[in-house]
Each structure stands twice: as structure tokens, then as C-alpha cells.
Amino acid sequence: MVACDHKVVGLLSIADEVKPETADAIASLKSLGVGNITMLTGDNARVAQAVAAQIGVDEFRAELMPQDKQSAIQEMKNEGKTVAMVGDGINDAPALALADVGIVMGGTGSDIAIEAADVTLMDGNLSRLVEFVQMSRKVLRRIKLNIFFSIIYNAIGLTLAMLGHLTPVMAVIFQEAGCVTVVLSSTLLLWAKVPGPKLRHAPALKGTT
């Protein structure tokens, strides 16, 4: 309230500014196939509704206590969903610990939240979450490829052994060749790049009266 001579002459409302990259990160996560993005917040419903509309989440739940966020995560898991929780504060710690994958934004995260999470992103920029998902999928594909290489080497080695053509020296070569192939294949991830979200300037959240 703003008063002059003991009379109310105005009302000021202040709200956190939404980072410009947030809406782009949400859109990129949806394009990657994330089925549902829900915002869990302790803010009041009006502010939560305004922010949810701006950043493009599927739904939101407002005025939540830490145990409410934890209950929301449990409810999603009971529905058979695989849940990733992203947070940074002490209030998020219980939900981060309960989620299938707890991700804390390390740039702004509290020590308790970092301890409770499975993954710590050392940047408060939400676009790093998109890069994390993309890189995780690259790693998973590489793991499957390495398993394929191992099966091929073993299949060839067993076939040669059954035919009586596999000498001890060749067996060692096959064994080491399989290990070297897997190591080299995994090393390629060091040069892997992810495109990340294409950021554009988004309007900041305005205060409401």
C-alpha cells in the first residue's frame, strides 16, 4: 500500500521476473517427447497462473507446502508415470528425493536440495535441462551400441571356437578388440554436441495490481 496523509493513494505489486529462456526450454522439452510438465509452487494461485501461462507448462499446482509437493510426485508415480523433479530450494528437497530422477539447478540450489537430488546441473539456466536430456539419450544409445558390439565379437568368437578355428592367441585378440572397440566408442561422447533450445527474447512477467 502507498499512502499520503494517512490516505491510500496506490497499490504496488511485485513479482519475480521469469527468465527469458524458460519458455523456450519448456517448448524444447515438449518437442523431445516429455509428456507432461507440471509446475509445483508455493506461490499464490494468481501468480502461479500468470507464470504458467507465460512459460507454457501443461498444468500447475499453487500454494503448496514441501509435503504437498512430495504428495504430488507420489500421485504421479502411482499413475505409472516416470517422474523427473527439477528444483533448487530446501522446500523442493523431499520431492527431489522421491522422484525417479531428482534434478537440482546447482547454480542457485541449496545444499540440502543438492544432497537430495540425483543430478546437479551447475547452471541455473533451465536450457541446461534440455541439453541434459539430449545428452542422456546419446549416452543411452551409445550403451546399446556398445552392447551390440560386444555380442557381435562374442558370437564370432564362439562360432570360430565351435568350428575349431579359434586359437588361444586369436581368443585374446578378440577379447581385447571388443574392449578397445567399446572404449573408443564411448570416448566419442567427449566430442558429442547437443543443439540445445533456440532461445528468443521473452517478455518479462509484469507486476499486477
Image (cartoon, rainbow, N blue to C red):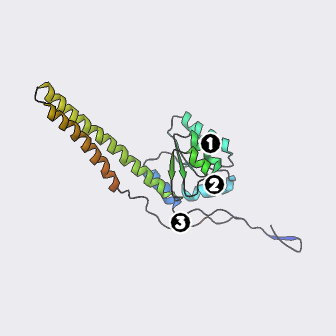
* Residue for point 64% across, 62% down: 16
Q: Secondary structure at mark 3?
A: loop
* Image x and y of residue 205, in percent: 61, 64
How crowded pointer 2 is (Cα within 10 Å; few <14, some 14-19, many 20+) is rated as some
Q: Residue at label 3? A: 202
The residues bearing labels 3 and 1 have C-alpha atoms spaced at a distance of 31 Å
| Residue type at tag 3 | Ala
* Residue for point 51% across, 50% down: 120
Of marks 3 and 1, which one's residue comes earlier in the chain? Answer: 1
* Image x and y of residue 108, in percent: 58, 57
| Residue type at tag 2 | Gln
Q: Residue at label 1? A: 94
The residue sitting at the bottom extreme is 5
In the rendered view, would you say 17 is above or below 161?
Answer: below
Q: Which numbered circle lies on residue 49?
A: 2
Q: Nearer the viewer, mark 3 or mark 2?
A: 3
Q: Which quarter of the image is occupied by the C terminus?
A: bottom right
Q: Nearer the viewer, mark 2 or mark 1?
A: 1
How crowded pointer 1 is (Cα within 10 Å; few <14, some 14-19, many 20+) is rated as many
* Residue for point 42% across, 58% down: 196
Of marks 3 and 2, which one's residue comes earlier in the chain? Answer: 2
Q: Secondary structure at mark 2?
A: helix
How crowded pointer 3 is (Cα within 10 Å; few <14, some 14-19, many 20+) is rated as some
Discs 3, 1 touching: Cβ within 8 Å: no
